Structures are given as C-alpha cells and as structure tokens.
C-alpha cells in the first residue's frame, strides 16, 4: 500500500490560515491502514484545529468527511454538491488523492494533510517499511524476492557493496543490507549459483526517469 | 607480452613486476598546487596514482581535473569514478574526456553514500552500479561503441580496475563477487585496507582455489595507521573495515609521539608478509593525507626503485 | 464507604480504558473541559491484556496535541488502580482537581464563553 505520515499540526495551522470554511477530507484506503489520513485522523485533526483557532477568536469552520477513496472519480463525485460550502479542502489522502481532487475541483484550494512516503508494508502496528519504488520493470524473480532498488541505499543491482557489515547497511545500523537478505534467501532456496549471474544495465525508462507514466489497457477500456 | 592498453600500470604487471600505486585525494578548493605537491612527493616511488572521486561523499575538485594535473607532470593517473553522482551520459562523457588526455586507467566504484558527506540532502544517481560501469568502459574500449550503440570516434583505451573488500559481509560471497567483477571485465583489483592479515590470506586462498588470481591483477590495499585513536575510529566507524584489536593494542602500547612510526612499521611488515602470498600482483598504498610517508613505506618494503617499463 | 471527593467532574464509565480513543478526550477539551483524567486498571492486570497500555499511549498522544494547539498537555493524565481501591480513586480525583485548579481554566473554555457572550 501507499504509506503516508501525518504532517505536523503546526504546519497545517499555517497552511489553513487564509481560509474560513474548510473541509477536512479523509480517505478510507491506504492512509487509513497506516493511521495517517482515515476517519479517526480526520476527527482528531479537525478537533485540534478547532481548539487552536477558537483561542485566536477566529470563526473558522472545520467540517469532517471521509471518502471510500480519493483516487477514483465516483467517490470524489459524492462531495460535488457540498463543495460550494468550502473555501478549501484539507485532504488527508496520499499525493494521488490530493491531486485527483485538484483536477476535479479546479477552483477549490487544496491543502495536503499528510506526507506521502513510499510503497510499503505494515511490519507491525505503528511500523511501516518500504518495499517497492514502482520502477515499472520488476526484477524480483532474479533477486530472491527482495528488491535491491527499494531496499539498497545505492540501489546496487550487483551487490552487496563494500559497506555491508553484519547484515546491516553502511548508512545506518538499523537498516538491513538488502543484498545480505538476497544472499540469505538464495542460500535457503538452494540457488546460490545464481548469485554469479551479472544483472545487466537496467532500463530505467519505465521508472520515474522516463517521465510521468501511464498504464493504458485497451482490453478493459469501454 | 600482449598489452590491451597503453597503460603503464598494465605494463608493469605484465612485465612480472610487483606494482605499486598510491592515492591522492583532490583538495576542497581549486588550487592545483594541492594536487601537484602531493604528486611530487610520491612521483618516483609509485607506478600509478589513484585520484579519488569525491571520497566519503565530500565535495572536492573533480577527479578528472586532478588526473589531468598529474598527467601533465608526468605521473600515471588512475581515474576513480563513482556511480553515485553521474548517470550513464555523464560517465561515458567523462571517460571520453579522460581518454582525450590519454588517461589510461580507470577504477570503477559505487562510492560512499551521500549521507556521509557534506551534501546529505542531495540525490544520488546510481544509474549503473560499479560492475556495470566496468562493463561500460570495456564496451566502449573493446567494441568502440557507446552504450546506446553508436560508434565512438577514437574509443577510450583504458585499463579497467575495480575494488574488492575481502572483509565486508557476507564473507561467503566475497570471492564469488570478485569472480563477478572479473566476468564484467575488471583487469586489476585494489582491495580495501588490509589489517586482518589472516582473514585476507584466507580470502586469497579461496581466490586461488578458483584460479581468479590468474585472471586479474590483485593489489593489496595498505593504509598506515597514524595513531591508536585512528585505528579505533577505522574499526568502529568506517563501514566494511576490519581492524583486529592486536593492531590497536600494539599502537596503544607505544607512547603517543611514536605511534605514527609504529603504524608505518606495521604497514611495512604487512607488505613484506603479503609479498610472499601467491596471487598478489601489487600494493596500493593509501596514506590518507600522509602522502609524504609513501616513499619510506615503499623503500622499506623493498619495492624501490620502481621498474622502468 | 463514604469518601470525600470533588464533585466538579463527570465520570464516564467504560468497560475498559482501552475503549477510550484520542477523539473522546479531545472532544471533552473542545467542549470546554479544563482537564481529563483516565483511570485504568493496574498495568499488567488488564482483563483485555493491553487495554490500559493502549489508553496510556492515547493519553500521551492527546497531551502532545494539546501542547501543539496551546491548551497544554498537562491537562490530561492517566492513573492506574485496582477495582477495590475506592479511597485511592478519591485521592486521585482530589489530586487532579488541585492540579487543574492550579493551571486555571482551559483557554478553549474561556474562548467558548467569550464567543457565547458576544453572540
């Protein structure tokens, strides 16, 4: 899923200052699972903002709403008839949702309430870690199911680099060396002989480097 | 003797001599004197000199520019290139630039992570990794073509090296990894600084077991310790470094102002011992910001005078 | 057992402090409460294993938010006692009452009153 983290309330206080009628809009998908932008976070943030601004004598109004998703037309349409009531939307969706909102409601100012971080997994409650950088050309079949692009600080395709120590990365002793994990798993899969296959120079054009990407599936379009 | 390139370093190896290289870190400024004075100190005691490429990710004068300064004073530079800061366009372009000055050696590295340096908030590139950079230089040289497939007019003619760290983890793939670099086209190897002689000899034994020492020229990396605190720092803070306690104890066992000399003695003893190890083709003496000591180490190790090739 | 206890707080009974969410405490402050204290079972004695630990974490979250928005995190506290300790409950209530009185009225409550007077 997409993992996001809450923006500091102080930052949000500054960005909502120019507006009086604000819709705090959550999303029921990824940001709910990572406890950054679901219904609960909408309630808490709205409450905190109300308490802050009432002390300033301001008459700001923060309404709360959470959509099933903010990255789909049909759910974003649900709020079309109430959008006139607001000067701005404080969206707790990921960067995708915020932008899709902006495209749909062209004249409503949008404020992001979370920092969108990465594609990751829930290791345990309160701990999310990166697993994928969406390079558009998956290599996991050749790397024992562990991604050197998202999990190696130098995205070394033929690793490990000389900085791997005790299974940890040179940048931080809390970070696993992706290549140690790859080698451990190759050994357990009895596929160590594959280690010596040189991974050729990667085509990064399917990654960010190639510009904004599109997946177009004519077979399912109607 | 079949030479692949006009490299003096290649010629020293192929004439059967034990090669000696050293290292110059370019300055954090634009004064060419900072490079040429270091070059002058070691000129007669080494066959070639590595010029580091923004080592530890600290911004410095470019490796290529420093190589040119040394080349112009008659030294044989080894251009270090890291894949951290440049994509394949820039790397190929700089290889051609170096070749235009007849810089005949290149050492391909991934580079320390930028978080260690002065631009921790910067991007890193890593379009290629170090092995793929070795492949790239060999492709440009041997095929005379760019990665994109077009012909190169006057292709670069470089002797291609890579690094090996016998001490990084996991140990079991350290020799397979060397084999991989050789398969990519590495012709010489410079190792990480060696302090754990026993572990290094074990690595060399495994290297010989696979006959890799006959496919590549392996240079043992030697860095004299200036003091016991430096040894401790290297042990605890430098990634992938293996400094046994006995080295630290030996340095700490002599009074402070004699520790530097003790460090030189240890370095010389290690070189003398490793000279006897089959498959060691040379020594890479990295006296970090201590270049003036290189002549003493080379002379006392019995590696002077350097051969005329 | 007749215990002396302040009467200026409202008790909200819950099956477990694990049921208390951040928003419940925030809502009380939003409506003008000067303080909130959560009284849970002794740590390690939760019938639902971790309810009181969850509550403590949430109290800490609320305190951080109250600090950020200028209400003051010291207005929310968590206490632990076992179900038979009525006198201790009374003691904690007295302690909390004194603590909040020393802090004075919540700025949110004051602002709410000002708004009502203006209207």
Image (tube, coloured by chain):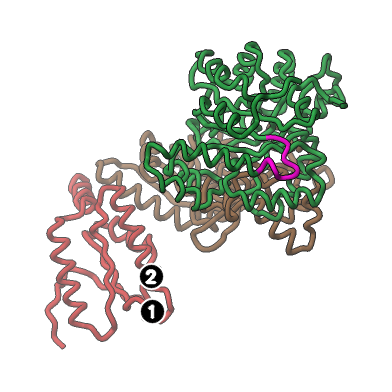
Chain colours: A brown, B green, C red
Report if residue B276 lies within the magenta region.
Answer: yes
Q: Residue at x 55, y 45 (%)?
A: B239
- Res. B148 mark: none
Residue C75: x percent and y percent?
A: 23, 59
Tell which subunit mark 2 falls on: C
Label 1: state its secondary structure: loop
Q: Residue at x 14, y 56 (%)?
A: C104
The answer to whether the residues at label 1 and label 2 have Cβ atoms under 8 Å apart is yes
Q: Do we see residue B26 in this rendering?
A: yes
Describe residue B245's horizontal placement relative to residue B100 as left or right: left
Label 2 Cα crowd, 10 Å radius (few <14 / some 14-19 / many 20+): some
The residue closer to the viewer here, C100 or A81, is C100
Q: Do we see residue B59 in this rendering?
A: no
First along the sequence among labels 1 and 2 = 1
The residue pinned by badge 2 equals: C53
Q: Are marks 1 and 2 on the same chain?
A: yes
The residue closer to the viewer here, A195 or B209, is B209
- Res. C46 mark: 1
**Does residue B137 sit above or below B251 in this rendering?**
above
Residue B43: x percent and y percent?
A: 61, 19
Magenta residues, start to end? B274-282
């Amino acid at each position: 899923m997409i993992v996001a983290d809450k923006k500091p309330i102080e930052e949000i206080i500054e960005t909502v200052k120019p507006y009086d009628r604000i819709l705090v809009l959550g999303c029921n998908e990824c940001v709910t699972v990572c406890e950054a932008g679901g219904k609960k976070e909408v309630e808490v943030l709205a409450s905190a903002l109300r308490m802050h601004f009432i002390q300033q004598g301001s008459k700001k109004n923060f309404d709360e709403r959470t959509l099933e998703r903010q990255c789909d037309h049909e759910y974003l349409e649900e709020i079309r008839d109430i959008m006139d009531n607001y000067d701005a939307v404080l969206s707790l969706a990921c960067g995708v949702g915020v932008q899709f909102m902006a495209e749909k409601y062209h004249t409503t100012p949008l404020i992001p309430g979370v920092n969108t971080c990465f594609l990751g997994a829930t290791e345990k409650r309160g701990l999310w870690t990166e697993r994928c950088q969406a390079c558009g050309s998956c290599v996991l079949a050749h790397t024992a199911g562990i991604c050197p692009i998202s999990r190696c600080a130098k995205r070394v395709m033929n690793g490990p680099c000389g900085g791997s120590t005790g299974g940890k990365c040179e940048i931080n002793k809390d970070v696993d060396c992706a290549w140690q994990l790859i080698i451990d798993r190759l050994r357990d899969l009895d596929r160590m002989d594959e280690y010596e296959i040189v991974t050729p120079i990667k085509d990064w054009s399917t990654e960010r480097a190639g510009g904004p990407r599109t997946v177009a599936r004519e077979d399912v379009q109607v | 003797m079949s030479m692949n390139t006009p490299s003096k370093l290649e010629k020293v190896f192929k004439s059967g001599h034990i090669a000696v290289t050293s290292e110059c870190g370019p300055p954090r400024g634009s004064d060419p004197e900072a490079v040429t004075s270091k070059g002058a100190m070691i000129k007669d005691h080494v066959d070639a000199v590595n010029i580091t490429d923004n080592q530890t990710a600290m911004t410095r004068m470019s490796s290529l520019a420093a190589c040119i300064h040394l080349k112009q004073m008659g030294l044989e530079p080894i251009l270090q290139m890291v894949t951290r800061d440049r994509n394949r366009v820039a790397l190929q372009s700089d290889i051609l630039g170096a070749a235009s000055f007849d810089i005949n050696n290149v050492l391909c590295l991934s580079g320390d992570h930028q978080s260690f340096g002065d631009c921790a908030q910067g991007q890193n590139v890593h379009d290629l990794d170090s092995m793929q950079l070795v492949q790239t230089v060999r492709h440009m040289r041997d095929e005379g073509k760019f990665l994109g497939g077009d012909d190169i007019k006057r292709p670069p003619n470089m002797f291609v090296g890579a690094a090996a760290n016998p001490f990084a983890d996991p140990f079991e793939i350290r020799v397979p990894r060397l084999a991989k670099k050789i398969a990519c086209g590495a012709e010489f190897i410079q190792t990480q600084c060696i302090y754990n002689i026993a572990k290094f000899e074990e690595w060399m034994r495994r290297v010989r077991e696979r006959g890799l020492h006959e496919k590549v020229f392996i240079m043992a990396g030697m860095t004299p310790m200036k003091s016991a605190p430096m040894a401790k720092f290297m042990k605890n803070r430098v990634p992938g470094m293996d400094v046994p306690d006995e080295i630290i104890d030996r340095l700490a066992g002599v009074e402070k102002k004699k520790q530097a000399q003790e460090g030189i003695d240890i370095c010389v003893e290690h070189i003398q011992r490793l000279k006897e190890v089959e498959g060691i083709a040379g020594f890479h003496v990295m006296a970090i910001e201590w270049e003036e000591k290189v002549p003493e180490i080379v002379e006392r190790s019995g590696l002077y005078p350097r051969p005329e090739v | 057992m007749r215990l002396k206890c302040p009467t200026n707080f409202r008790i909200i009974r819950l099956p477990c402090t694990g049921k208390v969410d951040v928003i419940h405490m925030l809502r009380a402050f939003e409506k003008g409460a000067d303080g909130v204290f959560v009284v849970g079972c002794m740590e390690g004695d939760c019938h639902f294993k971790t309810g009181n630990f969850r509550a403590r974490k949430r109290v800490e979250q609320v305190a951080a938010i109250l600090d950020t928005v200028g209400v003051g995190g010291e207005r929310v506290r968590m206490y632990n006692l076992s179900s038979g300790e009525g006198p201790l409950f009374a003691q904690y209530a007295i302690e909390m009452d004194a603590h909040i009185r020393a802090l004075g009225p919540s700025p949110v409550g004051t602002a709410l009153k000002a708004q009502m007077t203006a209207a």
